[in-house]
Amino acid sequence: MEIFSNILIYFVIVPVLTLAGLALCSNKGIKAIRTVAVAGASVLVALAIYLVYLFLQARGAGDTSEMILRTDVTWFAPFNIKLALGVDGISVVMILLSAFIVFAGVFASWKMNPLPKQFFLWFYLLSTGVFGFFISIDLFTMFMFYEVALIPMYLLIGVWGSGSKNYSAMKLTLMLMGGSAFLMLGLIGIYFHSAADGNLTMNVLEIAHNDAIPHQWQLWLFPLTFIGFGVLGAMFPFHTWSPDGHASAPTAVSMLHAGVLMKLGGYGCFRIAIYLMPFAANELAWIFLTLTGVSIVYGAFSACVQTDLKYINAYSSVSHCGMVLFAILMFNTTAMTGAVLQMLSHGLMTALFFALIGMIYGRTHTRDIRDMGGMMTIMPYLGVGYVVAGLASLGLPGLSGFAAEMTIFFGSFEHSDMFHRVLTIAATCSIVITAVYILRVVGKLLFGAVQNEHHRELTDASWEERLSTATLMLSVAAIGCFPNFFVNIISDSFLPVVKALGAMI
Amino acid sequence: MNLTLLMYLVPSLVMFGCGVYGFLTRKNMIAIMISLELMLNSVDINFVVFNRYLFPGQMDGMFFTLFAIAIAAAETALALAIIINVFRVARKVDINELTKLKF
Amino acid sequence: MDYSQFLFMPQEIGLLFVFLLVFIYDTFMPARMGKHLPMFATILTALYTVYAFFPCPDSWGMAFGGMFESNPATWVMKNILNVGVVIVMLQSIKWTNDDFVSVRRGEFYELILLTLFGMFLMISARHFLLFVIGLETASLPIAALAAFEKRYYESHEAAAKYVFTAVFSSAIFMLGISFVYGMSGSLYFQEIGSQIVGVKSPLLILAVAFVIAGVGYKLSLVPFHQWTADVYQGAPTAVTSYLSVISKGAAAFAFMVILVQVFGAVYSQVWQWMLYAIIILTITIGNLFAMRQRNLKRFLAYSSISQAGYIMLGVIAASQVGMTSMIYYVLVYIFSNLAAFGVIAVIERATGRVTMDDYNGLFKTNPWLAFTMMLAMFSLGGIPPFAGFFSKFFIFVGACHTGSVAIYVLVFIALVNTIISLYYYLLVVKAMFIRQDECVIPYIDSHWTEEIALTVCVMGIIAVGVASGIYTFLNQVTETITPMFNMVG
Amino acid sequence: MPLSYTIAVIAIPLLMFFFLGLAGVKMDKKLTGVLGVIGMLITTVIAYGVALTYFFGSDQGQVADGVRQAVVVFNPDWLSFTKTLVVRMGIMLDPIAAMMLIVITTVSLMVHLYSLGYMCDHHGHAEKGFQRYYAFLALFTFSMLGLVVATNLFQIFIFFEMVGLSSYLLIGFYYQSPAAVHASKKAFIVTRLADLFFLLGIMILSYYTGTFDFDQLVFGPNGANSLEVAQSAIATGGGATFLGCSVMAWALTFIFIGGAGKSAMYPLHIWLPDAMEGPTPVSALIHAATMVVAGVFLVARLFPLYVIEQGAMEIICVVGAFTAFYAAAIACVQSDIKRALAFSTVSQIAFMMTSLAVSSADGGLIEIHGGHGLGFMASMFHLFTHAMFKALLFLCAGAIIHAVHSNENSKMHGLHKYMPITSIAFLIGCLAIAGIPPFAGFWSKDEILVACYAKGTGWGIWMSMVAGMTAFYMFRIYFLIFHWKKHEVHTEHAPSDQPWTMTLPLIILATISIVAGFVPAHDLVTWDGKELHTQLNWTVAGSSVLIACIGIGLAFKMYYKENELPDKLQARFSGLWEAAYRRFYMDELYQFITHKVIFQGICKPIAKFDRGIIDGFFNLLASVTGSAAYGIRRLQNGSIQSYVYVYLVGALALAVITMVCVLI
């Protein structure tokens, strides 16, 4: 089986093995469960870092092929469905991101209760889907892993969630599945027009090179796929699953969902919708630019009045993910690179946010900022962590948010068209609004006098919580301080797309 | 006088209609069964007549009719048995009794 | 006549043989041996199934002047049904040994085998006479089976409803056939097909509508579906599961054969659009009704109605790809639905509880049953990596293969409906995993036969999808009957 | 000393920040303070070495044919947007950068030392968060130094954000007091708003010029500011216009707004008075001496561009002149000494801005409205001197507050005999800012006034009047604190001069304030690096001194001895006094805009819309489906006959509809 000689497949095999290992653990043996979970996560991180090394090596060795580590294994011959593996810079950094967040998530759910074993089972099923999505470049396989990643959310929220979890879980699942309904139709449509010469294919690269999708078909396949992924990318007006979902989800699930799962949306929008249908992308970009532009400002504004920490974060996610899609639709390398940076940044930062919120909630049992105050004196470590996350979110230099947003803004402004310019400026205004709501919550939550005297007894972070958050903080700082390292990995991967789009204009 | 195709088809159709009407209106299960028989038999007539008038060269219709009659007999037997069962439980053969399972 | 042509029907012969053995055992064995009859019948059927997997080298061809055809496709279809029947039998062993039904356990197995035989005839029939015989053989005994639980009133009501509507629909069906006969002067599928090329008479359309109604009745397509829920709910669970998968699968295959071979010429003008409307109605109505059900058997009845709608997506394609994905869908559907019914049967047998609220907190007490049920629900809902996802995707692809925009719209409607269906499938999962209850079902020590049956289903759900060889094989099989689709116009 | 040592000047504070921030928590508080001071001392020494080398040593090749040119020490890529548009993180030394190095390190060192005493209570115990305080001071110093040595516009923007952050952290140092938290939030958001415009400005500028680097925007081949280069940079705008003005004018105006936010120009000044909630040494360092002049520095950095885009320059001129007067007027009536000083800072910075703005048109126009930049030199000079004496004043104020535990001058009065050193230092500061020769302020302010008169007599008179007001309000404060009437002791022990850690910086700064005026700024900090030959303009100098004396006299008359005059005047012009005291209601206006308009008028409706309409729509879909399912259940009414009826009707309908469609 030559497929096992490809490192990529192990990003799926390792989680599956972890699943098996967890299944073997007994429900009571919490130690064994933790060990297996941590082992799996660590192996994934190691693999991801090694993958980055491989990628840099390949590029350094002058391998300019669009995707490296390619392997095709026929799966369903009648439909020419293959297990097609391959990564470019974007997927590499996405895999890196996912690995780190899975790692942090395991530690964030260290004291998960009840049913830790089942929790980690679902957790790793979700991870399997995520990694599978990023490593595969076959429409069918991608879609399959996409849904594999979606469905565990239902039980993860429903069983381990809090608040109105039943409602939120069902809403989230159904809305995302509704998105994937659009998506499936779009994919089928793409498949049937994937080749002019009749031998249809599901391989993204081949479809892109055939460039056989008729324009009038593109015009309605593009919206289907873009909306399909856009729902997961929390694009206005399909974002409403996000606040409720995040509010009810347990910590690690929020981390993984906002940190990684929502990135599937942006990634898919770029990799499938835009890459395969440049004509329609050019024709219809203005619609989605308007929508995403709206979600940037809209999310930020609605975050200003929320009082539940997780709602604030969910809406800021709407804003930041809106920025991702916004930048992707700008169709130039700089902005798209910024989009991927923003995905990384938002992933880590939001994961950090949710981790901290979960830890604070676990102590105070409230997420309402009006009931809290002066946390900085009570739990300084978490407080500082929260400030760091906040500063990253409002785009402070030296942290990830700044580099990402600046790249997006300058890239988008490269666009000579006045419409894009105006939208860009509108989007830029969000940095002020972001500052407003971030400082508002920081001021209310961490500073000021202690609201509730009982909070004085609360403890600061435990070691595993420190480890989990420190990992994320360091990653955020790393991106913020050395953005060029990531930019160099990412930016070349956009050339084919930009070329295809340029050919259309 | 020579009878045309229509002269057979129309009565058979009427028969079928009567059967349907009876099925839809009667309350007594036995009556409903009888109307079912009417329907089946009208179908048989159709086959026979088509065979006799349109395709005199072959026997397909006739054979079909024979089998149809047999099947109808089987159905009747089965239906009767079930009606009796229902009667045992419900002490009635009123079709409106059978509305416990709904929605 | 030339008896060698019986060689073309090895599976039917084998089945009859099994039936006779069971019958003889039931009749002549002393009463004390009676409790072994279920096991005997099951093992026998299992052996026969294995045997049936190996076709005789020259067993493809027409028999009895073209009334009966045996080709790889029919052979595969029959094998699939065999597997299903074996699972159903395994599940019902424990139940048929209960005191109330044990006296009639013989009939249960004999009738099931007989019905299966009828279905085989339906599948292989290429002449309406044989088809009608098969249809009736397949449907009448089920009325008796439905009435099996004599102590329950619901059982009788179900049987009555079934028999009356069944006879009515067969009357309508035969009326339709009589029209066809009147027009074409033949009852052979292919001859009729060649006769009606270019015919555009109201009579033909009426005939098509009646034939669709007649077979659609067995498939419980809307608006010919209303018996389904009541019968499924009233009949014994074993019978319901049998009814929901086996007869549905057989009917689906036969339906496609008739529509393609007999009415293929009027595909695009006539029956494509009829089916179009029927599919939309079936999926939507089925889903809407299923949403509100609390009784799980009734719930699965409606879900199986909407599933039938999805199966029809393969039929409306009227192509080899469509047929492949339809057979595949039936296969997956057999495993998923039988898993669900298996769990229901176990719990009903042990506690007599069948409503969704009884399942609250089931995961705490019976994790494996809950897990199996969840897999079944996910598979029915089309969630990867379970088989249901693949079958749904392929049936959609098969439908879109026609390439007409109308079909894309149809698929889109179907997709939107999958969201509704996912909703109510998740309701079951929610009850088992999320909800809590004080009077939760206690731990159930299920019988080993039931465990085997459930295990087979679970393996099927997990393996059939991922193991792509199965689909590929089905594809090769159907490729041998591609000529059948040539006259589709 | 090689110029590359500048790296150390940047690096040491950063390391101090991380060291004190991480390890400091475990260490003894006083120790961390001492470490901070030592680190800062080393930084200062190196900075002085570098700056003096740059100015006077000629072996580093920074002076070519009489032109003092910019030296780029190192300049690695940090973030590349495109192949050409690259953000670099570098270190560049040119006259103003070198001067700023001296200013920043000096004041910062003084503040570090001073804080050792200030951040302790009377028993000499360090306050809570002492390490955090020093860590933040180090962070600020790093950011400010990074800002002034920036090699490109984007780097300046980055460090704008960083100083904003450190200012936020230090203002909110007492994070348990709501006022401090609110003030820090306000400061950050207002400056962030300004930075938004700065960012937009950079976007536009970089889009048209395709670069951030100063050596392509303003620096000529000889490494000094050159109008020709600026000309060509502007020209790349291709005369593109937006709403009638050239895009470059827009860009430069936006960039100025960014600077105005930091430098508290009207109407973005509102954060500065509140910023006084922070510890007083912080106010001295950040909000008097260094950070608030970042805006001036920014404009000075892009001076040639502004010179050519006269439109932007005019705006700066007007804003500056108005702000100078506005702040002075408010300063005249404030009772909180720190706020009064804050407004005097605003006014003084406005002086610098104005002087920059008038600079292009001052005496003897040379080729293209260039001007030989007397105003530029004056502005930078004033920046230097002002930093010194304003820091001095603030530190004195700190000493006083530390002694009497209040900011209100009503709690002070007659402190002269209690704390003589502080009193004298404060007096020196006042004389300096009032522009009395030979104190530092005189020289710089005189140059500014000359530049203003050169632009137009109106401007000159206006600014001279403001200078007079400056003298008045500064001495008003001085007299109210140290004289007015006998001090009644509020606290258990009488106020007195503070420990040496606090008085030493006062003495040093006082000395500097006296002698700083004799620094040969003309030769050192000029916009084109050439030496600038000016001689004292006696008419202007004399008049300004006269006006200053009048102001002082007035203040003496009104506030030296306790009397009724102030109250009478206040009663006479009560409306005016009230308005000035309430800072002309600017805060109320902002309050209204932010809370009523934005929060209540935009955010809340949007949130409601989201929950109600958008989310409501999806919930509606669900409920509609549910009710539909409930509605159609009657179809399944359990009666066989109705089933058959539906069956038959269905079949017939199917047939009939198809017939209609097919046959007709």
Image (cartoon, grey):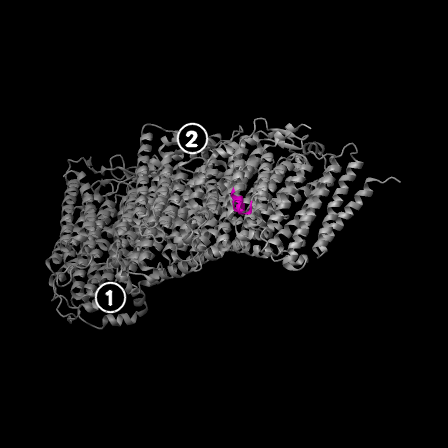
Q: Mark 1, chain letter?
A: D
Element class at badge 1: loop
Image: D661 above or below A435: above
- Residues at discs 1 and 2 in contact (Cβ within 8 Å): no
**Pick the front one: D13 or C265:** C265
Q: Which mark is residue D335?
A: 1
Q: Is residue C38 magenta?
A: yes
Q: Is residue D264 magenta?
A: no
Image quadrant containing the C terminus of chain C: top right
Q: Main secondary structure of the magenta part?
A: helix
Residue for point 26% across, 59% down: A378
Q: Identify the residue under disc 2.
A: A72
Give x and y (percent) for residue D310: 34, 46
Which quadrant of the view contains residue A364? Answer: bottom left
The part of the chain drawn in magenta is C30-39
- Determine crowd level at label 1: few under 14, some 14-19, many 20+ residues with C-alpha closer than 10 A: some
